[in-house]
Amino acid sequence: MTHWSPPSLDVLLLAARAAFLVFSFALAAVAFTRWRRVAERDTAHTTQHLLLLQQRLEQLERAVASCEPRLAKLVAHLEEQPAANCGPGVNYQIAIRLARSGAKPAELMSDCGLSRQEAELVARLHGRARRVQGAGVAIA
C-alpha cells in the first residue's frame, strides 16, 4: 500500500496561482461583457436622440420655409404703406438716443424735427438727469 504524501508548497502555490489567473480571466470577461452591453445601450440611446433632433430640425426648417413667403408679402406691404405714426422729419428713436447722450431740447428740435413740447418730453424721459435720478443720485 502506498502512502499518500501531501503536495509540496511549490505545487500548492502553483495551483493557487493558476486558480487566481482563471478567476481573474473570468472576472475580466464578465466585466468586459457588461461594459460592451452598456456601451451598445448608450450608443443606441444616443442614436435615437440624434434621430429625434434631426426630425425636430427638419420640422423647424419646414416651418421657417413656410414663413418666408408670408414674411416677404408683409415686408412688401409695409414698404407700400406710408408711415402713419410720425410726420416727415420726426424720428423719435434718434431723438431718444440723442437725449440719452445728453442732447438739449433745442438740439432735438433742430436735428429730429420735434416740436418744443415733444423735445422737452423726450429730454425729461430719456435724458441723463432722469437716468441718474433713477439710480438714486439727483442732479438738476
Image (cartoon, rainbow, N blue to C red):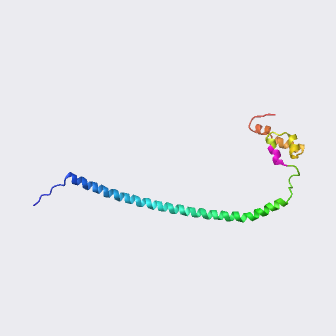
| Relative image position of residue 85 (x, y in whole percent) | 86, 53
Range drawn in magenta? 91-97
Which quarter of the image is occupied by the C terminus? top right
> Who's the residue at 43% across and 59% down the image?
35
Taking the view exactly as shown, the residue that stands out farthest to the left is 1
Q: Quadrant of residue 121?
A: top right
Q: Is residue 74 left or right of residue 106?
A: left
> Who's the residue at 81% across and 48% down the image?
93
| Relative image position of residue 4 (x, y in whole percent) | 14, 57
Indicate whether residue 46 is drawn in magenta. Answer: no
> Who's the residue at 50% across and 61% down the image?
43
Q: Quadrant of residue 67?
A: bottom right
Q: Is residue 28 left or right of residue 66?
A: left
| Relative image position of residue 101 (x, y in whole percent) | 79, 40
| Relative image position of residue 36 (x, y in whole percent) | 44, 61
Residue 131 sits above or below residue 86 on the image? above
| Main secondary structure of the magenta stretch | helix
Indicate whether residue 95 is drawn in magenta. Answer: yes
Count of numbered labels shown in the rendering: 0
Taking the view exactly as shown, the residue that stands out farthest to the right is 115
> Who's the residue at 53% across and 61% down the image?
46
Which quarter of the image is occupied by the N terminus? bottom left
